[in-house]
Amino acid sequence: MAIIATLFPVNQSGGQSPLDQAENSQGERGLRAVMPPIDSVIEFDTPAADAVLAALQIFPADNPWNLPVDQWPLHPRSDQIVATIGPDKPLRYNPDMAFVIVPPDHPRQDLVSVQYRDESDAGPFPLPANLPIEGWPATYRRDASLAGMTLEDVQRDRRELGG
């Protein structure tokens, strides 16, 4: 919890209720989830991960991202803006951008970055055994050129596919 408390202002008050009163930027009272304990690796697509993320206050309370905007007046060109985006287009997302939540005391390991070393953080990192890897296995199933390759083959670009 210490690392999360350092990175994010979280509610760690505990108590009987799973929700705690929190004051928003307009001075109104609202509900914010209480941070559950993180004592093991939590996969991203689980109710346990949802509970942790619901308790994080990503931006300060007075940040515009925390303001309710449903009652604000629309921009004069709102219809044109929406039409440009496409009101009937489906929501797109990247399903292979998964993550895990690790406890603060999770063992750390060195990781050697083969690309973008100057843009990468210095290690060591808390890397659990079930760490999801971007593009794997979803990209593998969509790209026939990767058939018969192991994850290590793909990572080391053994067929010189540019990855």
Image (tube, rainbow, N blue to C red):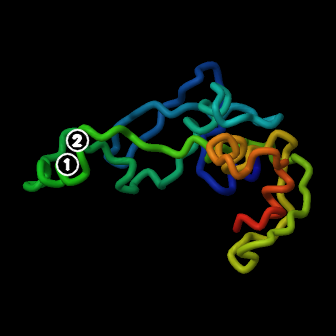
Residue 55 falls in image quadrant: top right
| Image quadrant containing the C terminus | bottom right
In this view of the protein, which residue sits in the foreground, 41 or 111?
Answer: 111
Which percent across, then down, holds residue 24? Answer: 39, 43
Please say if the residues under marks 2 and 1 sit with CB atoms less than 8 Å apart: yes
In this view of the protein, which residue sits in the foreground, 31 or 143?
Answer: 143
Sequence-wise first label, 2 or 1: 1
Which percent across, then down, holds residue 23? Answer: 42, 41
Q: Which residue is mark 1?
A: 82
Q: Is residue 30 above or below residue 4?
A: above
**In this picture, residue 116 sits left or right of residue 19:** right
Q: How far separated are the C-alphas under marks 2 and 1?
A: 6 Å
Neighbour class for label 2 at 10 Å: few (<14), some, many (≥20)?
few
**In this picture, residue 92 sits left or right of residue 144:** left
**In this picture, residue 39 sits left or right of residue 134:** right
Q: Is residue 75 above or below residue 103?
A: below
User: Type of residue at label 1?
Assistant: Val
In this view of the protein, which residue sits in the foreground, 37 or 40?
Answer: 40
Q: Which residue is mark 2?
A: 87
